[in-house]
């Protein structure tokens, strides 16, 4: 038998001891997986927001009742006007000539009536004395009635011409705010052509467009709130006043008007506003969509309890844009696994780490 060199004996002894230790010891424990968790919280109301514009409930396009050339525009857009205040004027030349012609026709009709009356009275005396026939008297009587009718016609025409002369000045019947100018001085306009648009500011509302999928929700909304883009911290109460029965052919949305209840003075026409309305949750809990699993036996989620995985069958009330609303199967505060739950098994030990809240995920 060959003897080993003395220098190798200690090395072989150490190797033998190492092999013996590996065969007789326990294997190292498996590392626990790290999971992201999030507590089950109450589902906030699912609110929809639509951007619109502050408008007046009553908006009117003002126009002259007669045609002509605009000689003066007395207000600008944004002006606050009073009832009866002059806003614009037409060239009065033609209107004054028409009024003068009507007065001349009235004077001529009055003269013709006086002549016809005198003739009728004279023939009435002659027919009584048998100097003229009854037929001749009836002719004079008919001439008198015609002259009287022409006088009434001339009086009506004179009144119309006088009114038309007054129509040369445009005014508003109520206090209002000028929102848009549609014509300017020097422009020739026809009767009824809009010259400016005014709005009565005592009643304000928000004009928005609603898609057809949210019509029922808007009609059933009991809590409508309005916020201003210029002052987002201010929330105003509103109510649905008007909803169009037909969709806009271009946008396929329905025009709606939300009346503001007791708006403050800083709410001005033309401001940008957002209308908020939505559903209530009725005690539902909200979990991320990634936390809901289903392997053919109904939906469930996995939670971490005492450092181990446990499955909880749940009832899903609705799937929302911000998660799944759970109506039963979970309790508020349960630690729900939000990622990778499908790769875990019940009873498996895990290390829970809090997931970043959705409002801080940027």
Image (cartoon, rainbow, N blue to C red):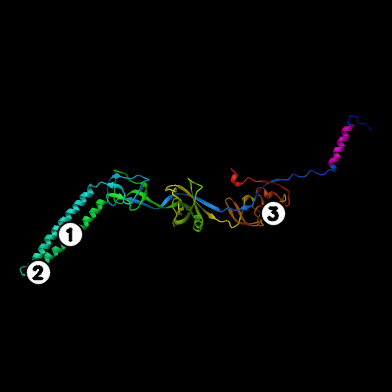
Q: Nearer the viewer, mark 3 or mark 1?
A: 1
Residue nearer the viewer, 4 or 183: 183
Residue on which the image places disc 3 = 311
Q: Is residue 20 magenta?
A: yes
Residues at circles 2 and 3 in contact by the CB criterion of under 8 Å? no
Splitting the image into 4 quarters, where does residue 157 fall?
bottom left
What is the CA distance from the residue labelled 2 to the residue labelled 1?
A: 26 Å
Using the image, determine if residue 125 lies above or below residue 256. below
Identify the secondary structure beneath mark 1: helix
The magenta-colored residue range is 9-22
Using the image, determine if residue 192 lies above or below residue 119. above
Q: Is residue 179 magenta?
A: no
Identify the secondary structure beneath mark 3: strand
Residue on which the image places disc 1 = 151
What is the CA distance from the residue labelled 3 to the residue labelled 1?
A: 101 Å
Please state the horizontal and vertical placement of residue 48, each as a whole percent of the image: 52, 52
Q: Counting other residues with Cα less than 10 Å from the Cα at mark 2, is it few (<14), some (14-19), or many (20 or more)? A: some
Residue on which the image places disc 2 = 134
Q: Residue at x 69, y 49 (%)?
A: 343
Q: Counting other residues with Cα less than 10 Å from the Cα at mark 3, is it few (<14), some (14-19), or many (20 or more)? A: some
Please state the horizontal and vertical placement of residue 351, each as a whole percent of the image: 71, 46
Residues at circles 3 and 1 in contact by the CB criterion of under 8 Å? no
Which residue, as the protein is rendered here, is positioned at the far right? 1
Q: Is residue 323 left or right of residue 216?
A: right
Residues at circles 2 and 1 in contact by the CB criterion of under 8 Å? no
């Amino acid at each position: 038998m060959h003897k080993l060199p003395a220098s190798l004996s200690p090395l072989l002894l150490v190797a033998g001891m190492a092999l013996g230790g590996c065969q007789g010891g326990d294997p190292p424990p498996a590392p626990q997986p790290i999971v992201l968790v999030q507590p089950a919280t109450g589902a906030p109301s699912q609110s929809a927001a639509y951007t619109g514009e502050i408008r007046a409930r009553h908006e009117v396009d003002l126009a002259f009742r007669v045609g002509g050339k605009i000689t003066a525009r007395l207000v600008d857009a944004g002006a606050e006007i009073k009832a009866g205040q002059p806003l614009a004027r037409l060239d009065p030349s033609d209107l004054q000539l028409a009024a003068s012609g009507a007065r001349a026709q009235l004077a001529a009709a009055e003269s013709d009536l006086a002549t016809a009356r005198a003739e009728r009275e004279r023939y009435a005396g002659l027919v009584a004395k048998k100097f003229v026939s009854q037929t001749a008297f009836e002719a004079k009587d008919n001439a008198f009635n015609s002259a009287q009718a022409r006088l009434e016609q001339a009086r009506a025409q004179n009144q119309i011409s006088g009114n038309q002369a007054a129509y040369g000045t445009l005014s508003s019947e109520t206090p209002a705010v000028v929102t848009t100018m549609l014509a300017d001085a020097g422009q020739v306009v026809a009767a009824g052509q809009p010259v400016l648009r005014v709005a009565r500011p005592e009643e304000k509302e928000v004009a928005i467009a609603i898609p057809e999928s949210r019509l029922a929700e808007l009609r059933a909304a009991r809590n409508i709130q309005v916020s201003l883009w210029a002052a987002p911290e201010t929330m105003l109460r509103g109510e649905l006043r008007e909803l169009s029965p037909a969709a806009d052919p271009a946008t396929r949305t329905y025009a709606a008007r939300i009346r503001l209840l007791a708006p403050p003075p800083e709410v001005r026409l033309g401001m940008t506003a957002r209308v908020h309305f939505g559903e209530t949750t009725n005690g539902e809990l909200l979990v991320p969509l990634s936390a809901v699993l289903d392997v053919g036996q109904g939906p469930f989620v996995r939670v971490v309890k005492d450092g181990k995985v446990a499955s909880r069958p749940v009832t899903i009330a609705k799937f929302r844009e911000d998660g799944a609303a759970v109506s039963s199967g979970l309790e508020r505060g349960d630690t729900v696994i939000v990622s990778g739950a499908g790769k875990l098994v019940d009873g498996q030990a895990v290390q829970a780490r809090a997931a970043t809240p959705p409002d801080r995920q940027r």
